[in-house]
Amino acid sequence: MVNLLSIADGITLLNAILGFLALLMVFSHQFTLAASFILLGLLADGLDGLVARFIGNGKLGEFLETIADMVSLSVAPLALVYAIYYDAITSELFVHLLVGIVLVFSLVCSIIRLSSFSLLRQKQSFVGLPTSASAIFLVIITFLKPGIWYVLPAIVILSLAMVSSLGFPKPGLKVNLIAAVFIVVTILLDSMYGNIAPLLLLVALSFYIVVGPIYLQVKKRSNISGTGDTRS
């Protein structure tokens, strides 16, 4: 079985390991470390794709990536959010139940999104919001800790976006490098300087989520218009 793996698959396995370590940190109430492991998993998730483009992927790569992302980009972030808000919601049964329903809903959407990724793969865009974007948002929550009534609607919206038919642009190498810098700075600075690093990451993420689909629609209409002008 080991012969079916490539170097890129090894990085994918590292992503899964980081997700598992994040879960262990959640159980140990080491929330900052848990968030850091999830962010490192995000970096590994991006790196394995880059390495695969240059040296190729193993026969198990596609299957490994889905499983690894499920652990590091879905289960671990959702568990972290639940642990962060546990003390605030445990005394109210209705709120506790509602939080559980929303988190399970997000988990189901993540499963659907990840399992359908290979079937809906496109060269220039993603169909549905990438799970990594949702994971970044969930981790940012653990730094900023907004009220639960702000968090729940946001999770529902992002979950619906994951299973929607909306198109989101695939970032190029430069954008990915900038995103990696934001993530590394967030890990290093944590909540220092008034949470400036998580806030900047949130602004960049919000810009991508809101502007991304609009940009693709404008680009698509421009291409159609250009094609029509050429024919005429």
Image (cartoon, rainbow, N blue to C red):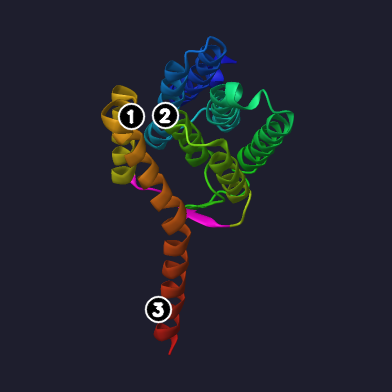
Tell me the tag on residue 226: 3
Percent x, y for residue 87? 59, 21
**Residue at image location 57% in from the left, 50% down from the top:** 128
Disc 3: CA contacts within 10 A as few (<14), some (14-19) or many (>=20): few
* Residue indicated by mark 1: 186
**Residue at image location 52% in from the left, 37% down from the top:** 147
Amino acid found under the numbered disc labelled 1: Thr
The answer to whether the residue labelled 1 contacts the one labelled 2, judged by CB atoms less than 8 Å apart, is: yes
Numbered disc 3: secondary structure:
helix
Would residue 149 appear left or right of 204 to someone viewing this image?
right
Tell me the tag on residue 143: 2
The answer to whether the residue labelled 3 contacts the one labelled 1, judged by CB atoms less than 8 Å apart, is: no
Numbered disc 2: secondary structure:
helix
Q: Is residue 217 above or below residue 30?
A: below
Label located before the other in sequence (1 or 2):
2
Q: Nearer the viewer, mark 3 or mark 1?
A: 1
Q: Does the stretch in magenta take in 188?
A: no
Nearer the observer, 193 or 6: 193
Which region shows up in magenta? 166-172
Q: Does the stretch in magenta take in 171?
A: yes
Disc 2: CA contacts within 10 A as few (<14), some (14-19) or many (>=20): some
Outermost residue, bottom side: 232
Percent x, y for residue 145? 47, 31
Location of the C terminus by quadrant is bottom left
Nearer the observer, 33 or 40: 33
Q: Nearer the viewer, mark 1 or mark 2?
A: 2
Nearer the observer, 22 or 144: 144
Label located before the other in sequence (3 or 2):
2
Would residue 44 appear left or right of 96 to someone viewing this image?
left
Q: Is residue 100 above or below residue 13?
A: below
Disc 1: CA contacts within 10 A as few (<14), some (14-19) or many (>=20): many
